[in-house]
Image: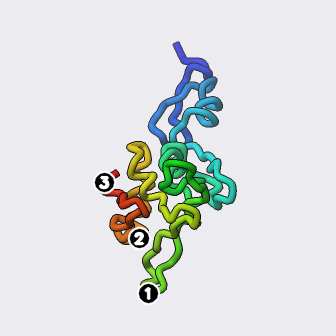
Amino acid sequence: MALSSEQESSPCPHNCGIDLKLFERKYHIENECPKRWVKCQHDGCDQEKIRADSHQSHQQTCNHRIIPCGSLSSPCYKPLHAWLKVDDDDLSVSCLVPCQRHNNHPIVWAATKSNEINVAELLLDRSRNKAISFETPFGDTPLIR
């Protein structure tokens, strides 16, 4: 007995490895497929399309994500890219810019949050690990947080 067209399955068009029945196809492609295209939620991000399976990682390290300085009392908030500026001596390296109010960096904040390790790694990478030696006015560093 032949299968009806609704019972036949075919691979997802995004090549995620799942075989879909016709009635499952639209919902899967729009809502479930890890290879579907999604948009970044951060205002100003120029990455219009991100694969769903990379979305969480992108959201965490997006240049337009608003993150705080390391002050635990009343932190300042600004986009990730605003905490970095090109090093005048080495254009391939970024320097962390402290907040003017607390003289603090987001590396201290990220180092205190186990779920923000990607942000800490990004800041360290972009500063070629110069950020690791940053010391707050209170003597804290990312290493002792």
Q: Dot 1 corresponds to which residue?
A: 89
Q: Amino acid at mark 2?
A: Ser
Residues at discs 2 and 1 in contact (Cβ within 8 Å): no
Can see residue 9?
Answer: yes
- Taking 125 as reference, is 50 left or right? right
Q: CA distance from mark 3 to mark 1?
A: 28 Å
- Judged from the image, the secondary structure of the residue bearing numbered disc 1 is loop
Q: Amino acid at mark 3?
A: Ile
Q: Dot 3 corresponds to which residue?
A: 144
Marks 2 and 3: which is nearer the front? 3
Disc 3 crowd rating (10 Å Cα; few below 14, some 14-19, many 20+) is few
Q: Dot 2 corresponds to which residue?
A: 127
Please report the residue visible at 65 percent of the width from the left and 31 percent of the height from the top: 26
Nearest to N terminus: mark 2 or mark 1: 1
* Residue 35 position within the rendered picture, expressed as x and y whole percent measured from the top left: 52, 43
Q: CA distance from mark 2 to mark 3?
A: 19 Å
- Judged from the image, the secondary structure of the residue bearing numbered disc 2 is loop
Q: Residue furthest top?
A: 1
- Judged from the image, the secondary structure of the residue bearing numbered disc 3 is loop
Q: Quadrant of residue 122?
A: bottom left
Disc 2 crowd rating (10 Å Cα; few below 14, some 14-19, many 20+) is many
Nearest to N terminus: mark 2 or mark 3: 2
Depth check, front residue: 42 or 15: 42
* Residue 100 position within the rendered picture, expressed as x and y whole percent measured from the top left: 57, 67
Q: CA distance from mark 2 to mark 1?
A: 12 Å
